Amino acid sequence: AAGVIQSPRHLIKEKRETATLKCYPIPRHDTVYWYQQGPGQDPQFLISFYEKMQSDKGSIPDRFSAQQFSDYHSELNMSSLELGDSALYFCASSYYGTGRNEQFFGPGTRLTVL
Amino acid sequence: AQKVTQAQTEISVVEKEDVTLDCVYETRDTTYYLFWYKQPPSGELVFLIRRNSFDEQNEISGRYSWNFQKSTSSFNFTITASQVVDSAVYFCALTPNYGGATNKLIFGTGTLLAVQP
């Protein structure tokens, strides 16, 4: 079965640079979530989209922005990177129609900011 | 406010021992879902179980079992006859189920389980 795809899997950036993370949800899934997991921490919700509209927002810095495109893939744009942005970024997708609240996670993108 | 507490930061057991991971949650919602995820050293989040707040039946899946007690707001996870491959961080998570289009997961801080051979 198709799973959530995230690219790239690993990314190394310098401070103050920009990064773009991509997420391709499971086919027919209409909702995408982004989570950030710092070293030794639990995943923290950043933002979500339903049918290409932002549906919820968590502790996402103003330096970050995200969107969901017409094909339902999503991109997380991160600017002016800081050392503290080094983390594992997960994307998850779900299908609202089932009402089952099942979020399927991608393998994550490991971002290292030097 | 919603909160998930996993008081056990680290647990170390010897292979074949049984181990229980505790999870206590707080929510004012009358309906919600509870989850357990496994995160092995490779980093991915592996879904283990989802439980609706209306379903208090315990569940067993192979060596895994879950005990949901609404009266004490707990959703504990037991691994029977643990194996080295069970070594991972285990997260308990909560999401409301009030029919919204999206429901973010609220994770506990995780329990690191180390199973020694």
Image (cartoon, coloured by chain):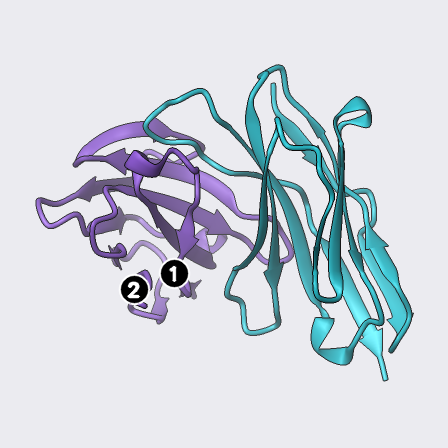
Chain colours: A purple, B cyan
* Label 1–label 2 contact, CB within 8 A: yes
Q: Which mark is residue B31?
A: none
Q: Relative to residue A8, is residue B31 drawn left or right?
A: right
Quadrant in which the N terminus of chain B is drawn: top right
Dot 1, crowdedness within 10 Å: few (<14), some or many (≥20)?
many
Q: Relative to residue B8, is residue A17 drawn left or right?
A: left
Residue at 64% across, 32% down:
B55
Seen as rendered, the residue at the extreme left is A70
Residue at 41% across, 53% down:
A104
Q: Position of residue B50 (x, y in %)?
A: 57, 44
Dot 2, crowdedness within 10 Å: few (<14), some or many (≥20)?
many
Q: Which residue in the protein does label 2 denote?
A: A5
The residue type indicated by label 1 comes to Gly
Vertical comparison of B37 with B41: above or below: above
Seen as rendered, the residue at the extreme bottom is B117
Residue at 70% across, 33% down:
B56
Number of disc labels: 2
Going from N to C along the chain, the mark reached first, 1 or 2, is 2
Vertical comparison of A106 with B108: above or below: below
Task: Say yes or no: labels 1 and 2 on the same chain.
Answer: yes
Q: Secondary structure at mark 2?
A: strand
Residues under labels 1 and 2: Cα distance? Answer: 6 Å
Q: Secondary structure at mark 1?
A: loop
Q: Which residue in the protein does label 1 denote?
A: A106
Residue at 43% across, 46% down:
A35
* Chain under disc 1: A
* Chain under disc 2: A
Vertical comparison of B2 with B17: above or below: above
Q: Relative to residue B115, is residue A65 drawn left or right?
A: left
Q: Quadrant of residue B22?
A: top right
Q: Position of residue B35 (x, y in %)?
A: 59, 44
